[in-house]
Amino acid sequence: MDSVKLIEVIRAIGSRIEEEKDFLTELDNVIGDGDHGINMARGFRAVEEKLEGLEDKDIGTILKTAGMALVSTVGGASGPLYGTAFMKAAMVMAGKTQIDMDGFLSCMDEAIGGVKMRGKAQQGEKTMLDAMIPAQDAMRQASSHGAEVKAVFEAGLKAAREGVEYTKTIIATKGRASYVGERSIGHQDPGATSFTDILETIAQNV
Ligand code: ADP
Ligand code: MG
């Protein structure tokens, strides 16, 4: 994938988030403060504006620009978290004009590391990490077994969806959802859901 295609994919993520905005907000209404869809949509609109004219830039610059736009325009926790994820991924792609599956997996490693660090969170706390980490593990495994790109994304997507289901069964211990304690059980995490939407959009566009 080159820079032109990457920008196309990021724009597609923006459209998907816009479509899912009300649903994500509804999910956040139940266990948080009802703004996840609004936050994500605002963030990705800013990203789209900032990506204007960056088609001739390297992958790292594009990811960094997207990350900075997310951090600076989203008030909620998800902006700095997704923003950090993009900015960390940008570092491994600095100066690169192509991204392949190995590159994508390295980006995911960095993104997960960034979210863990910034959110002081781990797997099992009912956050976006509960979709990101299983997806990454499944993709790495599929890739190491020589699966085609589409199949690698399919494996990741399946694991991410299972991760979202898993978030229904656990209590939130990080973020606003932790305030509702036991009442968070039975409800899926908005951030794990938005990550799965993002991964699905990437899978549909590679
Ligand atoms: P806020 O919680 O500030 O209102 P959002 O509603 O946009 O922000 O995002 C909420 C999502 O962010 C949660 O569903 C969860 O996935 C993720 N999240 C919140 N806090 C953390 C954290 N400390 N670490 C990782 N992810 C987190
Ligand atoms: Mg919220």
Image (cartoon, rainbow, N blue to C red):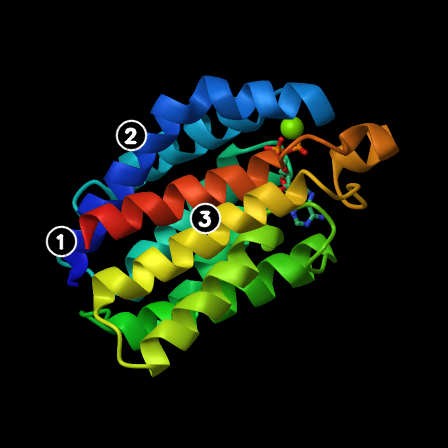
Q: Helix, strand or loop at disc 2?
A: helix
Taking the image in four quarters, ligand 2 sits in the one at: top right
Find disc 2 in the rendering and name its residue. Answer: 15
Disc 3: which residue: 68
Question: In whole angstroms, how far apart are the C-alphas of marks 3 and 1?
Answer: 19 Å
Residue ID for mark 1: 4
In the rendered structure, which amino acid carries the disc numbered 2?
Ser
Q: Are the residues at dot 3 and dot 2 in contact (C-beta closer than 8 Å)?
A: no
Vertical placement of residue 23 versus 164, above or below: above
- Depth order, front residue of 92/29: 29
State which quadrant residue 56 falls in. Answer: bottom left
Mark nearer the N terminus (3 vs 2): 2
Q: Nearer the viewer, residue 136 or 87?
A: 136
Q: Nearer the viewer, mark 3 or mark 1?
A: 1
Q: What amino acid is at disc 1?
A: Val
Q: Residue at x 36, y 24 (%)?
A: 18
Tell me the distance, in whole angstroms, between the alpha carbons under discs 3 and 2: 19 Å
Q: Could you tell me how many numbered marks the image carries?
A: 3
> What amino acid is found at the position of numbered circle 3 in the picture?
Met
Residue at horizontal 62%, vertical 34%?
188
Q: Earlier in the sequence, mark 3 or mark 1?
A: 1
